[in-house]
Image (spheres, helix red, strand yellow):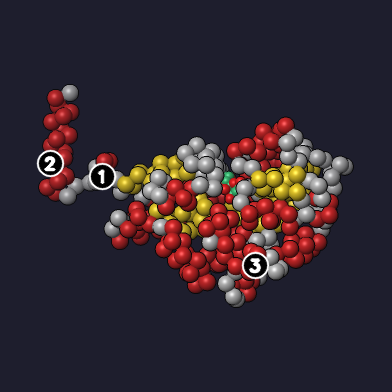
Amino acid sequence: MTFTLKTSALALMTAAVLGGPVLAQDKVTLRMSTPASETDQRSVALAEVFAPAVSDFATYEPHYNASLIAQGSELEAIASGDLEMSIASAQELATFFPEFSIFATGYVHQDAAHQVAVFNDALMDPFKKTVEDELGVKLLSVMYLGRRHVNLRQCPDEVNVQTPADLAGVNLRMPGTDAWQFLGKALGANPTPMAFTEVYTALQTGSVDGQDNPLPTVVDAKFFEVTCQVALTSHLVDLNYIAFSKEVWDGLTPEQQEAVQAAADAAAESGRQAQLKKEEDLVSFLTEQGLKIYEPDLKAFREHVQAQYVGSEFAQSWPEGVLEKINALGN
Ligand code: KDO
């Protein structure tokens, strides 16, 4: 005991005099809250790529399954200093800044590469600046969540999803913000708001008919155990932004800021590749599990969804010319 105390006292003095390694208590703690599980590819990328890259000066502290902050309240928590990081959706940002609904609109982003091109383009600068100035949140990088599809309890002999008309009367769980609910309606369904962590039980008990998420989430959250079909609508190429407290950022040295930015970009890239691979591989896994997976009339879905946005209150909030710039960055 005495030996340990003396040793650590000596280590402290040496570190103080020689400017030695940062001690654990000097490190900044980065609490990250998400509704996602620990095995979700975005969580894995942050834990395995982001965390070690900043570990010299920061302790990454992830909280999964919305165990620290409820889904949708993370940005407020960062703004009030109760959280340092989250993976925020454009739909959540749209509750503060309606113009973000452009990135939450069906059939706007074309694929993962398009998301990256849009995020890194100058068109994003005013969006990022607004979030930084008004919410104290920095959007560091864009994470790929994947192509969202319609996943139902009913089998195709009961509900065969070919066009939006086939979703009439279907209670489709969508996350609980206006932008999500609008998308559910635009698909032709009857959207029901619900937190992600409640979806499995709701599907199991039949309090909803279905939900929409990318295939990796259907597997990770085990929705395939309580559903019968996936109609590959690809209605939203979905994303999350790595959101970081501006107050914490401002307290870092320029070298540390550079390291945080590089770590976020590397984690996003690693998560993106893992998620893309899973999307490709999981069709056969889900088919083996007995799910019926098929492609509906995509033209009918795209045209119907896009028509709902034209003239909507969301479209009215989009800054002039941004949709054209986004489209120009695609194929
Ligand atoms: C969901 O609630 O369906 C959703 O996919 C919405 C996303 O924005 C994201 O928050 C995600 O849940 C969670 O990270 C859980 O995967």
Q: Is residue 223 left or right of residue 38?
A: right
Q: Residues within 10 Å of mark 2 (few under 14, many from 20)?
A: few
* SS label for mark 1: helix
Residue 319 percent location from the top left of the image: 57, 72
Q: Are marks 1 and 2 in contact (CB under 8 Å)?
A: no
Q: CA distance from mark 1 to mark 3?
A: 47 Å
Q: Which mark is residue 13?
A: 2
In this rendering, the label closer to the viewer, 3 or 2: 3
Point out the residue furthest to the top here: 1
Q: Position of residue 116 (x, y in %)?
A: 54, 63
CB under 8 Å between callouts 1 and 3?
no
Amino acid type assigned to the residue bearing label 1 in the image: Asp
Is label 2's Cβ within 8 Å of ligand 1? no
Q: CA distance from mark 1 to mark 2?
A: 15 Å
Near-viewer residue (108 or 275): 108
Mark pair 3, 2: CA separation: 61 Å
The residue located at (12%, 41%) in the rendering is 13
x%, y% of residue 278? Answer: 63, 47
Instruction: Residue at 73%, 46% (x, y): give it.
Output: 172
* Upstream in sequence: badge 1 or badge 2: 2
Label 1 sits on residue: 26
Asked which quadrant contains residue 303, the reply is: bottom right
Classify 10 Å Cα crowding around label 3: few (below 14), some (14-19), many (20 and above).
Answer: some
